[in-house]
Amino acid sequence: MGALWTETYKFKTWLEVELAVCDAQAELGYIPASAVEEIKAKANFDPKRILEIEAEVRHDVIAFLTNVNEYVGEAGRYIHLGLTSSDVLDTALALQMVASLDLLLSELETAIAAIRYQAQQHRDTVQIGRSHGIHAEPITFGFKLAGWLAEMLRHRDRLVRVRSSIAVGKISGAVGTYANIEPRIEEIACQKLGLEPDTASTQVISRDRHAEFLQHLALLAASIERFAVEIRNLQRSDVLEVEEYFSKGQKGSSAMPHKRNPIRSERLTGMARIVRGHAGTALENVALWHERDISHSSVERVILPDACILTHFMLREISELVKNLQVYPENMKRNMNVYGGVIFSQRVMLALVEKGMNREAAYKVVQSCAHQAWNQPDGDFHGAIVKDAAVTEKLSPQEIEDCFDPKYQLRHLDTVYQRLNI
């Protein structure tokens, strides 16, 4: 990914745009075909030389064109005819964003495959579901991962859609009026570059497109952060249901030899904050003065490479993290049964209601038993239930035991797996 945002690659895309325009000009008879062949044969650039020229002229595109013409010679007079700098800059930037997005989509597929695999492996690994950080009702770890998978599939759809939004070029001259270059040249050049002509550009391509691109990257980063935060929480010493892979020779703390910290998940959490910040900055770029200014340019030199490289790295990290995740079903079972199965309170309450007890009365009976067990070293919700006369009057011993079987809560999870084709 980093290679796509180097100065060399940027100049390469600039040259691609200039050559595509030359081809279009020749195809319509505006410049000699022989000149285009000479340009293609000789055209080259030297990044160091471009910087030398830019130090004098203080204009990056002029410096680039000057250097290219040093290679091309007389035929160079046909390069950049009727164009303005933004025709090259914005069209080439679209090529960079499209190439970056293709890499992101490829890496996203790897992450999707890793999550799908773990969701399959832990389809029946029973775990406590939590709300507000508090034990709620049974789920499976695979079901949790199925939710992650569904989210990543939505991201894939979003990135595919936004690709068409950013795959847009602009060859329409100063202020976008085609005063010195025909729209047909733009159509031909963009087709050669794999882009669509912008519908109605000014001197620049409107920055809502770039902002949309970064919003999608920020949203993807936010999802990765959500997964990372969940792993961090589940790795806590008092939970320890999953754990990041800890390699041989790895050390967790300079002071405490026992530490095995969720460093990759924490790293992902921090990176997501940066990508989100870049998305906000991209929104600031939308409001340019009149037909153009360059307040967006200095910003995009930072936020676009940074966001693409960070998001790509985040996808690689979450793929490796999920693929090698250490899962501890016995700890999940232990945590789920703390306080004597208090998490089955709703099932007991509903069983009492089904037997004719008023719902409020049933809630009060079950809550009383639950609170006797809650947060007590020897808390035993099951024991309290089987001793409560109001419960045993309505439910048989077997019916009570059935209330503590997690299969009841999990009986419809196949529906989710079927939706996701897992």
Image (cartoon, helix red, strand yellow):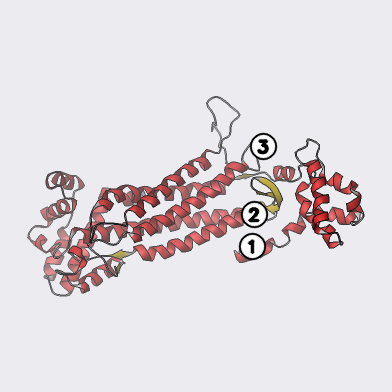
Q: Is residue 365 left or right of residue 318?
A: right
Quadrant of the image occupied by residue 215: bottom left
Q: Is residue 8 left or right of residue 240?
A: left
Q: Position of residue 28 (x, y in %)?
A: 16, 75
The amino acid at mark 2 is: Gly
Q: Earlier in the sequence, mark 3 or mark 1?
A: 3
- Mark 3 residue element: loop
Residue at image position (12%, 44%) is 56
Circle 3/circle 1 CB separation < 8 Å: no
The amino acid at mark 3 is: Asp
- Say if residue 130 shows up in the picture: yes
Q: CA separation, marks 3 and 1?
A: 30 Å
Select label 3 or label 1 by which is in front. Answer: 3
Q: CA separation, marks 1 and 2?
A: 9 Å
Circle 1/circle 2 CB separation < 8 Å: yes
Q: Residues within 10 Å of mark 2 (few under 14, many from 20)?
A: many
Q: Position of residue 312 (x, y in %)?
A: 43, 50
Q: Nearer the viewer, residue 87 or 52?
A: 87
Q: Earlier in the sequence, mark 1 or mark 2?
A: 2
Residue at image position (14%, 68%) is 180
Q: CA separation, marks 3 and 2?
A: 21 Å
Circle 3/circle 2 CB separation < 8 Å: no
Select label 3 or label 2 by which is in front. Answer: 3
The amino acid at mark 1 is: Tyr
Residue 107 to residue 168: above or below:
above
- Mark 1 residue element: helix
Question: Which residue position holds label 1?
Answer: 417
Q: Quadrant of the C terminus?
A: bottom right
Question: Which residue position holds label 3?
Answer: 238
Q: Position of residue 233 (x, y in %)?
A: 60, 42
Question: Which residue position holds label 2?
Answer: 142
- Say if residue 308 shows up in the picture: no
